[in-house]
Amino acid sequence: MSTYMEKSGEVERKWYIIDAAGKPLGRVAAAAASILRGKHKPTFTPHVDCGDHVIILNAEKAILTGNKLVQKYYYRHTGWIGGLKAVQYKELMEKRPEQAMELAVTGMLPHNTLGRTAATRLRVYKGEEHNHAAQKPEVWTMEIR
């Protein structure tokens, strides 16, 4: 008996909706990264991009446990000398909660071409409105604690 390996042309992609309201940001990001990779499928193949599309709603209502709102920072560098910029997560969640969720999900994806293409299938929205009704997305039913 041989192991089944999915080909890139045979992949059927579905659309899933994850509601982040009242759930920890990291748990939602981990579930989304798993769906984007395709790990929830029985035909998961590590070297093939076999993941699905993910829509995350209510990103501003995701919670950070403990003192992470005050103690956690997002760092980026401009490329210039002394150009390290730090943004506190409290400010990031107030101004751009979509970016905070995207950073969490992309950090959990592999840092190669598979991860970069999987990240293009992620859509994050601040509220409950999205414009992907034509794709007939399904609500992700597995529990996110």
Image (cartoon, rainbow, N blue to C red):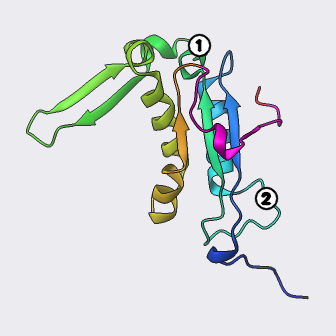
Secondary structure type for disc 2: loop
Cα–Cα gap, marks 2 and 1:
33 Å
Residue lying farthest to the right in this orientation = 1
- Residue found at x 49% / y 45%: 106
- Judged left or right of residue 33, residue 69 is left
Magenta span includes 37: no
Q: Position of residue 90 (x, y in %)?
A: 43, 12
Q: Main secondary structure of the magenta part?
A: loop
Q: Position of residue 133 (x, y in %)?
A: 65, 37
Mark 2 or 1: in front is: 2
Q: What stretch of residues is rendered in magenta?
A: 128-143
Amino acid on which disc 2 is placed? Lys
Instruction: Tell me where residue 26 sits by quadrant.
Output: top right
Where does label 2 land, which residue?
41
- Residue found at x 71% / y 52%: 14
Residue lying farthest to the bottom in this orientation = 1
Amino acid on which disc 1 is placed? Gly
Image: 80 above or below 14: above
- Judged left or right of residue 27, residue 103 is left
Residue lying farthest to the front in this orientation = 134
Q: Position of residue 42 (x, y in %)?
A: 83, 63
Image: 64 above or below 11: above
- Residue found at x 28% / y 24%: 86
Magenta span includes 135: yes
Sequence-first tag of 2 and 1: 2
Where does label 1 land, which residue?
66
